[in-house]
Image (cartoon, rainbow, N blue to C red):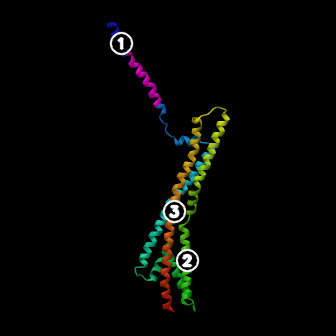
Amino acid sequence: MMSLLTALQATQVEALPEDAAAAEPVATAANAAAPASLDLLDLVLKASIPVQFIMLLLVVASIASWVIIFRKRAVLRRAAREAEQFEERFWSGAELSKLYSGATERGRTLGGSEAIFEAGFREFNRVRTRRGVDGRAQLEAAQRAMRVTTSRELDGLEHNLELLANIGSTAPYIGLVGTVFGIMVTMNSLLASNQQVGIKDVAPGISEALLATAIGLFVAIPAVWAYNRFASGVERLAVRYDAFAEEFSSILQRQAHVDD
């Protein structure tokens, strides 16, 4: 009886190392099943030459779009601020001749509403000095000058917006071209190996190819958003310039009538 109990105790003690040994393969399998981290730089370096060229092209387009975004943001803010400041002086009751003298000072760069005012008032005074010219001709000349200046101001505000729109609309398609090239290169290399392949053999090449599409989307989204925002800002300034030109035309019309 004592020998039987001793044998049972020995059996229980020896079962513990077996359980620990059985737990080791489970832990190893769990570690193997953990997903590997995605190394984007490694994907770029291992991509084919056409895909790398397309990625480089997208990076250059992204840099250009961000340069345009920051510059255009500063330009539109300055234009809105200058228009507000001049219109405050204009409607404060200051004399037109004093405003014109201040606008024509040397070393000053005119823009926005002030440039429209300067062009209209200059043309109005120039035509008024001619003999036999009625008030309607003076007003029409001033309005033409203001329309030309308004068009020039808006053209400056819209500068590079077309490039921003082109980047936003074409970047996804350029990235898709890189994806197509990447998949083609991957498939050709696997077919040339004449070996049975699995998902582990295809996945790296597909990941490299899809990275080009992802870069294209990251380039396009900020460009499209910025274009829509800046286009709305330019449109608001255009409405503001047109309204100021109409109001100034009314003032010149009354002044031409008094002179007549």
In the image, is residue 2 above or below residue 256?
above
Read off the residue under disc 3. Answer: 228
Q: Is residue 104 visible?
A: no
Q: Is residue 248 magenta?
A: no
In the image, is residue 28 above or below residue 166?
above
Q: Kindly report which numbered mark, 2 or 1, lies closer to the viewer in this rendering.
A: 1
Q: Secondary structure at mark 2?
A: helix
Residue 87: give x, y in percent of width and height. 44, 76
Q: Which residues are magenta?
A: 13-30
Read off the residue under disc 1. Answer: 8
In the image, is residue 116 above or below residue 212?
below
Main structural element of the magenta stretch: helix, strand or loop?
A: helix
Read off the residue under disc 2. Answer: 147
- Amino acid type at image mark 1: Leu
Question: Residue at 52% of width from left, 80% of height from top?
Answer: 120
Sequence-first disc among 2 and 1: 1
Sequence-first disc among 1 and 3: 1
- Amino acid type at image mark 2: Arg
Q: Kindly report which numbered mark, 3 or 2, lies closer to the viewer in this rendering.
A: 3
Residue 149's image quarter?
A: bottom right
Residue 80: give x, y in percent of width and height. 46, 69
- Amino acid type at image mark 3: Asn
